[in-house]
Amino acid sequence: MTTTPETTTDAAPETRSFEADVAKLLHLMVHSVYSDKDVFLRELISNAADACEKLRYEGLSDATLLGDDGQPRITVTLDATARTLTIEDNGIGMSEAELADALGTIARSGTKAFMDRIADAKGDKEPGGQLIGQFGVGFYSAFMVADHVDVSSRRAGAETAAIWSSDGLGTYTIRTVDLAEAPARGTRVLLHLKEDAANYTERHAVERTIKAQSGHVPVPIFLKESPEAELASIADGAALWTRPKAEITADDYKDFYRTAAGQFDDPALTLHYRAEGLHEYTVLAFVPGTKPFDLFDPDRAGRMKLYVRRVFITDEAQILPRYLRFVRGLVDSADLPLNVSREMIQESPVLAAIQKGVANRVLSELEKLSASDAEAYLRIWDDFGAVLKEGLYEDFARRETLLGLARFKTTASGGEWRSLKDYAAGLKENQTAIYYATGQDLDRLASSPQLEGFRARGIEVLLLPDQVDSFWVTSGVDHDGKPFKSVTQGLADLGLIPLLDGAQAAPVASDAVNAFMAFVKATLGDAVSDVRASERLTDSAVCLVAPDHGMDRQLEKLLAGAGQLGAAAKPVFEINPRHALITRLSEVADGDALREDAAHLLFDEARIADGELPLDPRAFAERLTRVLGRGLG
Ligand code: ADP
């Protein structure tokens, strides 16, 4: 049990255990070997600044909360003798219950993913800081440098104060204390530094780190090099986005991005502008330079912050559409009333105008980048393309723009990204559709038998490996009047498109082959909706496709898997009448058991090529054994 002997006890301290996840996380923090321990300063200062901004907001509707101290400030105090570092703010503060809630649990989903990741990142292959920031486990980073942390806090307007105390080893204590032991308002985080972290009591080192990491937080920061020293200002709290662009350096933007957006990489795109006219607002937004692990977590949606005339209002205003949820940053409106409640904001026409304006601007900046620096743009597409594509079926108004931004790997691209414009330039004579194949794995897609007939005609096929692909391609999109068509869907209309030189036309199936196909159909019965000669296949013997006018097979599987469809429709079984195996099989005498085994085995082979199991794995094994045995004589 942890107690702090130097403080008097008003009430017996209550020892509580950390939530299991916190304990695990702390263990990782304490035993981590990250080189970049400086991040704890950024995390604690960012918490302090958030607390000041929350108070500024609550003070709008209840000025008494501010008392006679209306100036937000963060003070960092060093004490080399006691080997401590203290970060104090006069922000909103925490009640006893809030202390327990905020510093004993992890509310964030994604923490599990974080811990798996951090456990994998042994040694220091990945900068630990990056992981810490991405999952908002900020406060606990204090235990990278401290072996004991005391957090005393008094909530604005409250007549009580409490101290949270822990050595980070599994339990913490909380108790109420005399008001004199806590800040007059706000939170004081006292770090008892580990021996090897004594450098955090050196003024120059700490000042340099804070200026570099947190120089642009919108709250002034002061430093006291010892408890008796004078306050020295080290950051003025001016909001970066209100300054003229010409005065801001790339490094200023980068520091701001890292502090304000909690990122640890370099932004891939920085957007800073002021909208004037009907509505006035300033936007400072960033496209991150790396993909977060929880990009698809719905809790992470819409992380743009909304300010009104420099006062932080909320980060839940959904400023950008869902498919732009990877964009970080803020909008500062000059028109919204300051006392607007968070609930009212969603209905405000001003917000609607901002939402529209900012989304359009982000997309047009991406367009510009794709023209001016294709390589930089492709890096963004690589990271966030799968999210942007959600817009293709969620945002009809911007569909054309998004289709223009979209890039694809194709059967002709050799692993590079191609645009639809590139695709259109290579259309074949009589080609009336844009062909695509969906699946989960790019390599398997590229080798699927359904593509053979397309290859023989030199027709490019888009390879779509993301889950969203199955949805947007079937939502009625077209490009330049050409619909999107799946290679597994119905008759592929390939007959009209000439074969490349050297490729052989599929001959009309011989009578023997026709008879064999009829036999296969009768043998497979209900398992298929039809059996027919394929225009698609050149090298493979068989494949499965969707019935004419049926749903794309991949989408069907997704929906059936999610229980949104009774059962997947029966596929069409296509047979390559020119394939040597098929012609040989059609010569096997009627009544020979080999014919029946072959019909089933061919069907199972097609299922396997589609990533499925044989229809009846046991029967499959028996047939295979039988046929192999026969082959051996
Ligand atoms: P995050 O800041 O990402 O939410 P943290 O672990 O850093 O995660 O902090 C957890 C919570 O503790 C914060 O969300 C906030 O509610 C509370 N908190 C931390 N530091 C302070 C502070 N200085 N003042 C008020 N509340 C704080």
Image (cartoon, rainbow, N blue to C red):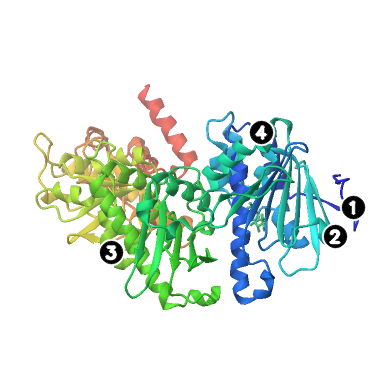
Amino acid type, mark 2:
Asp
Instruction: Provide residue 24's location: percent of width, then percent of height.
Output: 70, 42
Residue position for label 2: 178
Instruction: Provide residue 338's location: percent of width, then percent of height.
Output: 52, 74
Residue position for label 4: 199
Secondary element at tag 2: loop
* Above or below, 45 relative to 559: above
- Specify few, some or many for label 3: CA neighbours under 10 Å numbering under 14, 14-19, or 20 or more: few
Q: What is the quadrant of residue 52 in the picture?
A: bottom right
Mark 2 or mark 3, which has the lower sequence index? 2
Residue position for label 3: 476
Instruction: Tell me if label 1 and label 2 are in contact, CB under 8 Å.
Output: yes
- Specify few, some or many for label 4: CA neighbours under 10 Å numbering under 14, 14-19, or 20 or more: some
Q: Which mark is residue 334?
A: none
Quadrant location, the N terminus: top right
Q: Which mark is residue 8?
A: 1
